[in-house]
Amino acid sequence: MYRKICLSFAAVALSTALLAAPAFSKPTVIKFSHVVAENTPKGQMANKFRDLVKERLAGKVEVEVYPNSQLFGDNKVLEAMLLGDVQMAAPALSKYSRYTKKLQLFDLPFLFADMASVDRFQQSDKGKALLNSISEKGLIGLGYLHNGMKQLSSSKPLKVPADAKGLKFRIMSSDVLAAQFKAVHATPLKKPFSEVFTLLQTKAIDGQENTWSNIYSKKFFEVQPFITESNHGLLDYMVVTSIEFWDGLPQDVRLEVKKALDEAIAFGNKVAAEKSLADKQKIIDSKRSEIISLNADERTQWVEVMKPVWKEFEGEVGKDLIEAAYNSNQ
Ligand code: SIN
């Protein structure tokens, strides 16, 4: 009898221990979906995040990275996130307009003088508050990530705004970007990033705007004979997750994940700064594309023709935000 009691105690103790043992609980999987190549600032940031989480949260959290629109394109990823099919992504700030109009701020042409100004604004109270601008939709911004300033690539040389008249440009899904190209009497077409190369190659469109690293990594320079170094706009990202997923993580795990993400973002920003220079040089060295520089007068013409777009979107974005962002230029 005594032996029987001891044995059943032992059985209960063993099954309780098995249930509690971390070795038997599955790690939380964070699927991180993005649309760019792995050798870009965002690609490298996502991989760094995966590696840091593996190092620090092994057995508890696992990050799976899906690059090159393998899992979702940017037009679907936020819906998928709300359904729980993906946990993290970092769409360009231009791709949030179905969720908030405030982030359109970052698309206003010639708003930021350089990346240091972008940093100053994003790290200000107003900049940080924008990370919560999609919370009513169930999403939360965990941080900004840089890519860099955009350049204009085209099938013909673009020196002054009149050169763009009548040309078709692919844009991200942003009404501000549409207005920017309409301002120079060009035709903007909202198309997914994954289609841009083919659209350019088949000459279905004449040009597009993007950063040096995207133009290089997606080989746009091989099918675009001219790139104007316009630095007319910003391509930056917001790393995003769903509030339901984020709040569902145990607090200690959430803090560690956020710490790893912040470190990965800092790393990605460094990569962005380096790639902006290095990928531009690789494009120059390839001799596939002619790089056009603007003199002060030509640049002023682009600014003057595109700047009225600010006024057009002042109501949706907020005059105070536009002023704050502009004042971050020194
Ligand atoms: C990206 O860098 O994530 C894509 C940008 C684009 O759609 O042009």
Image: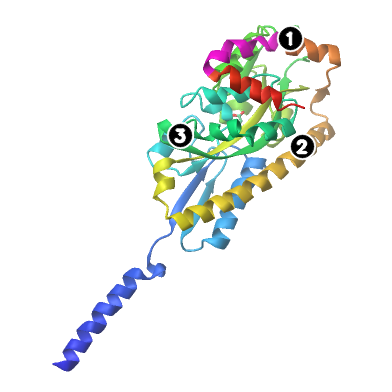
Q: Is residue 179 left or right of residue 282?
A: left
Q: Is residue 56 left or right of residue 225?
A: left
Q: Residue furthest bottom?
A: 2
In the image, residue 111 above or below residue 287: above
Mark 2 or 1, which is nearer the eye? 1
Q: Is residue 74 left or right of residue 186?
A: left
In the image, 128 versus 13, the foreground residue is 128
Q: Is residue 323 magenta?
A: no
Residue at image point 40% right, 61% down: 26
Mark 3 or 1, which is nearer the eye? 1
Span of residues in magenta:
304-316
Disc 3 designates what residue?
78
- Of mark 2 and mark 1, the one earlier in the sequence is 2
Residue at image point 67% right, 16% down: 206
Disc 1 designates what residue?
304
Mark 3 vs mark 2, CA separation in Å: 29 Å
Disc 2 designates what residue?
279
Q: CB atoms at circles 3 and 1 under 8 Å apart?
A: no
Q: Is residue 55 left or right of residue 250?
A: right
- Of mark 3 and mark 2, the one earlier in the sequence is 3
Mark 3 vs mark 1, CA separation in Å: 35 Å
Q: Please, what is the three-letter code of the amino acid marked with disc 3?
A: Leu
